[in-house]
Image (tube, helix red, strand yellow):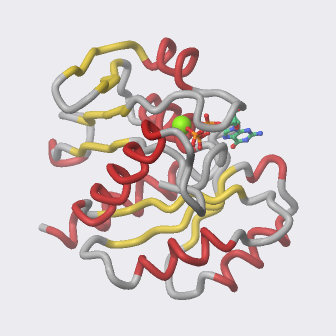
Amino acid sequence: MGRPNVGKTLLLLNFAAYLGVSEVYRRRGSRDERAITVATARRELVSQVALKHLDGLVVRVNGKLPGGRDLTLTDSAGLFEGVHPDVKVRHAMAETLERVFAAEMVVHVIDGGQASIAPIDEHLAALGGSVPGAWLVVANKADLAPDAAARELRHHFKDFPVLTLSAVTRRGFRKLKDHLLEHMERLG
Ligand SMILES: Nc1nc2c(ncn2[C@@H]2O[C@H](COP(=O)(O)OP(=O)(O)OP(=O)(O)O)[C@@H](O)[C@H]2O)c(=O)[nH]1
Ligand SMILES: [Mg+2]
């Protein structure tokens, strides 16, 4: 979850591949789910044009985690301030917020290279204290950001764990996996 174009979809897909998943599910509406390869999903759903695709994406990590635990990861449409003129975008955002309240863990993705913290990220982090699930901040695009930017984000979001990652170079994926496993362990 996070603003448009921060790299949520690429991060989810490359992390899925890192966990050994080769097939993911593209979701249109609540009933239409289609299996596609990670490579196809990357081609069709990752874009530098913000909000180009509003389709959902579900990753099921079954039988590939220690102890044979299952894990479901979902992508979401980018969130931003204000009322978008396109009703489809408004629906996608409402769905994202519903899922944020239902999730066992929310990964709040931020573009780690951005010059300053956007007001919407402040608002989303404020939500972090009130949702039932755990909240994790991920500073993505670390390959484009100086290390000082990550330090600043850690300082700014001190109420939450902050991981520095790159969906492109896969830096930090091990830490993300360990963090998820520890959280699953805590949930029992
Ligand atoms: N250099 C770099 N580029 C990245 C990284 N992660 C994503 N990108 C690029 O950022 C752009 C947006 O990536 P997406 O994964 O589509 O972003 P998103 O957050 O899902 O965007 P919306 O679906 O529009 O909300 C694409 O051009 C990606 O290739 C990263 O870690 N490093
Ligand atoms: Mg996306």
Q: Position of residue 185 (x, y in %)?
A: 21, 66
Q: From the viewer's perspective, is residue 64 above or below residue 45?
A: below
Q: Residue at x 53, y 33 (%)?
A: 14
Image check: 16 left or right of 101? right
* Residue toward you, 89 or 113: 89
The mark total stands at 0
**Corner quadrant of residue 22:** top left
**Corner quadrant of residue 117:** bottom right
Q: From the viewer's perspective, is residue 102 above or below residue 31?
A: below
Q: Position of residue 158 (x, y in %)?
A: 58, 87
* Residue toward you, 6 or 170: 6
Q: Residue at x 33, y 61 (%)?
A: 100
* Residue toward you, 21 or 160: 160
Q: Position of residue 109 (x, y in %)?
A: 56, 57
Image check: 178 left or right of 122? left
Image check: 136 left or right of 188? right
Q: From the viewer's perspective, is residue 163 above or below residue 75?
A: below
Q: Residue at x 20, y 34 (%)?
A: 62
Image check: 71 left or right of 105? left
If the image is split into quadrants, where does the C terminus sit?
bottom left
Q: Residue at x 69, y 85 (%)?
A: 155
- The residue furthest left is 188
* Residue toward you, 174 or 58: 58
Q: Position of residue 44 (x, y in %)?
A: 54, 16
**Corner quadrant of residue 10:** top right
Q: Which quadrant of the picture is home to ligand 1?
A: top right
